[in-house]
Image: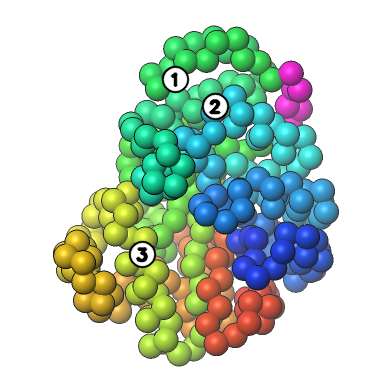
Amino acid sequence: MTSRYGITIPFDGVTLAEHRAWYTRLVDLGYTDVWSAEVDGTDGFTPLALAAAWEPRLNLGLAVAPTFTRGPGLLAMTIAALAEVAGDRLIVGLGASSQPVVERWNGIAYERPFARTRDVLRFVNRALAGEKIDEEFDTFAIHGFKLSRPVTQRPTILLGALRPTMLRLAGAEADGAILNWLAAEDVATCRAEVGLDKTIAARLFVVPTPDADLARTVGRRMISSYLTVRAYAEFHRWLGRAEQLGPMWEAWAAGDRKLANAAIPDEVVDALIIHGSYDACRDHVARYVDAGVAVPTIAIVPVGVTLEEAILGLAPR
């Protein structure tokens, strides 16, 4: 199907120590990448550091490291340390994250997210290149920082991006973009902003069940939880789903969660949530690859099956 086929880690209900056996098993099953996130579970770097040390055949990705929740120097040091272990197997995504993660959960003002992300990206690029940096950026000032452990194999740096300005920044100053919560048909729209010569990675949500009604019920809850966040709502307005998702946004704003879920059309769920038999799910992932996603990474939502069954069933053929 594709030369890259990733899966989201860490697995729920599996301790980080227990992932050692899983990392080897994933490679043997045909998975090429493990990708972490940084929201409210583990931090994004620790699961990848373990994978880098335990299973040298795996590619590693982080989608994304928020540009607000670490100081620029610490972020550069953390990326450099992981690159020292993983080398060119590593992809690090930088992104603005969201107001709930940054402000409500970390107590940091979520101000000027585009400018902050742009400045951190520029700083990280220069720091990884070995520069000594003494500069007033628009959103912070750095005086005399230089990595004391040089990066011999620079990791790939992608930008988590949802709308044209950030997508264009990903194309102009990063190695590409990480996409999230989009249909296969939306990839071309995003690639047009990033550039055809840049790497596109995407996290894809998979509910592996042939029971379409059950999958849509689960999918509606996921969609209403995510796409009511301002950044994602604006992303889908830009993609042209204002009419389809407008009733959900209105019901959500009014506090009626049940009505918000019911208002999401089946065709939107089917476009954004991969579901069906294992073969049907793999075919759906292939549509993203055909549209230009170089690194598809599935995020499994097991319904009616165990996580292990789903990992085995969704393994590439």
Please determine whether, in this image, residue 305 is positioned above or below residue 9. below
Q: How far apart are labels 2 and 1 at the CA level?
A: 9 Å
Give the residue drawn at x 78%, y 60%: 17
Tell me where residue 102 appears, x and y as whole percent.
43, 42
Marked residue nearer the N-terminal end (2 or 1)? 2
Please determine whether, in this image, residue 253 is positioned above or below residue 37. below
Q: What amino acid type should be assigned to the residue bearing mark 3?
A: Ser
Residue where numbered disc 2 is placed:
72
Label 1 near label 2: C-beta < 8 Å?
yes
Residue where numbered disc 1 is placed:
140
Check the picture and name the quadrant holding the C terminus: bottom right
Q: Where residue 99 is drawn, which disc sits there? A: none
Q: What amino acid type should be assigned to the residue bearing mark 2?
A: Pro
Residue where numbered disc 3 is placed:
225
Tell me where residue 68 appears, x and y as whole percent.
46, 35
Marked residue nearer the N-terminal end (2 or 3)? 2
Tell me where residue 249 appears, x and y as whole percent.
21, 63
Find numbered disc 2 in the image and state the secondary structure of the residue it sits on. helix
Q: How far apart are labels 2 and 3 at the CA level?
A: 30 Å
Tell me where residue 62 appears, x and y as whole percent.
59, 48
Question: Residue 3 lies in what quarter of the image?
Answer: bottom right
Give the residue drawn at x 54%, y 26%: 72
Residue 65 lies in the magenta-colored region? no
Q: Is residue 270 left or right of residue 39?
A: left
Find numbered disc 1 in the image and state the secondary structure of the residue it sits on. loop
Marked residue nearer the N-terminal end (3 or 1)? 1
Which residues, given as a range, are shown in magenta? 148-153
Q: Main secondary structure of the magenta part?
A: loop
Foreground: 104 or 219? Answer: 104
Label 3 near label 2: C-beta < 8 Å?
no
Please determine whether, in this image, residue 167 is positioned above or below residue 184. above
Q: Is residue 234 visible?
A: yes
